[in-house]
Image (cartoon, rainbow, N blue to C red):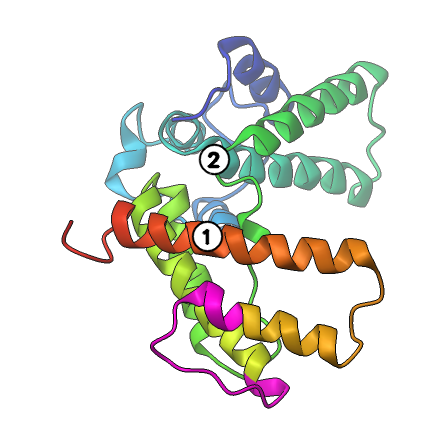
Amino acid sequence: MSDLSKIQKTKIEKLFEMGSGYVLGFSNRTFAQFILEIVDKDIYEERYSIFGDSKANRLRAFWKLESNYLVAKLTLELLEHWKTNKSLLEIDIEPKENALYEECTKFLEALKNDGISEHIENLMEPDIGDNDFSLLARTIRDSIEKNEPEVALDRLHTYVVKYVRSLCDKHGITYDNNKPLHSFYGEYVKYLRKNSYIESEMTEMILKNSISILDAFNDVRNNRSFAHDN
């Protein structure tokens, strides 16, 4: 459930001309396609009909049901769609409209940054030729958006293990598959230091501190997620 206030929703609705049940001139097909491409959601699922079947009511339901991050992401894209259409149709944006657009953009950006999934879009597939990373990243993002932190922690641990092992493989660093994450990450840090990849004391300090962080991550994953029956 998002934290959009009633006043904020009213301001967005005014820009989108939602009073008649429509949203920015979308047809049912283009509306569904737009939302699917932006947030990978089917706006014509039954759960989005709680306020009615119109496009405006389905968008209102989306605002009510989804996370701050998803609500902000979609609505910001709709704002840009509004602005782009004005430009393409060579329709001047009135000063009052522009002020409302800027205000809506500002509070939606704040909502996006405050959302539970603030940085999940940065979790991308590393360029190491392993297709499992894209699946893991998608699973982690989905778990965070669904407010399932235990599942996300477990999958994130798997993601980090695979990534650190790939770094070791890249440099020919041998490791024991039974060693915990922080141990073979420590081997990676030793290799970087020995081969003069580390150029400053600060960098070495950060890398060494990361070993302790990953050790703590092992505890969280093993004792506070669904990885083991505990």
Q: Which residue is mark 2?
A: 116
Q: Nearer the observer, disc 1 or disc 2?
A: 2
The tally of labels here is 2
Q: Is residue 17 inside the magenta stretch? A: no
Contact (Cβ within 8 Å) of mark 1 with mark 2 = no
For this orientation, the residue located farthest to the top is: 7
39 above or below 186? above
Location of the N terminus (image quadrant)? top left
Is 127 above or below relative to 3?
A: below
Asked whether the viewer can see residue 42, the reply is no
Question: Is 160 left or right of 75, judged from the image as shown?
Answer: left
Q: Residue at x 37, y 80 (%)?
A: 177
Name the quadrant containing residue 106: top right
Magenta part of the chain: 169-185
Percent x, y of residue 23: 53, 32
Q: Nearer the viewer, residue 142 or 59?
A: 142
| Residue 123, position as x, y percentages in the image | 55, 57
Vertical relation: 2 (above or below) 167: above
Name the amino acid type tagged 2: Ile
Question: Is disc 2 placed on a helix, strand or loop?
Answer: loop
Q: Could you say whether the residue bearing mark 1 is in a helix, strand or loop?
A: helix
Q: Which quadrant of the view contains residue 111?
A: top right
How far apart marks 1 and 2 lie (CA) works out to 21 Å
> Residue pushed farthest bottom?
172
Q: Residues within 10 Å of mark 1 (few under 14, many from 20)?
A: some
Callout 2 crowding tier (Cα within 10 Å): few <14, some 14–19, many ≥20: some
Residue holding disc 1: 36
Q: Position of residue 94 (x, y in %)?
A: 83, 20
Q: Which label's residue is closer to the chain start, 1 or 2?
A: 1
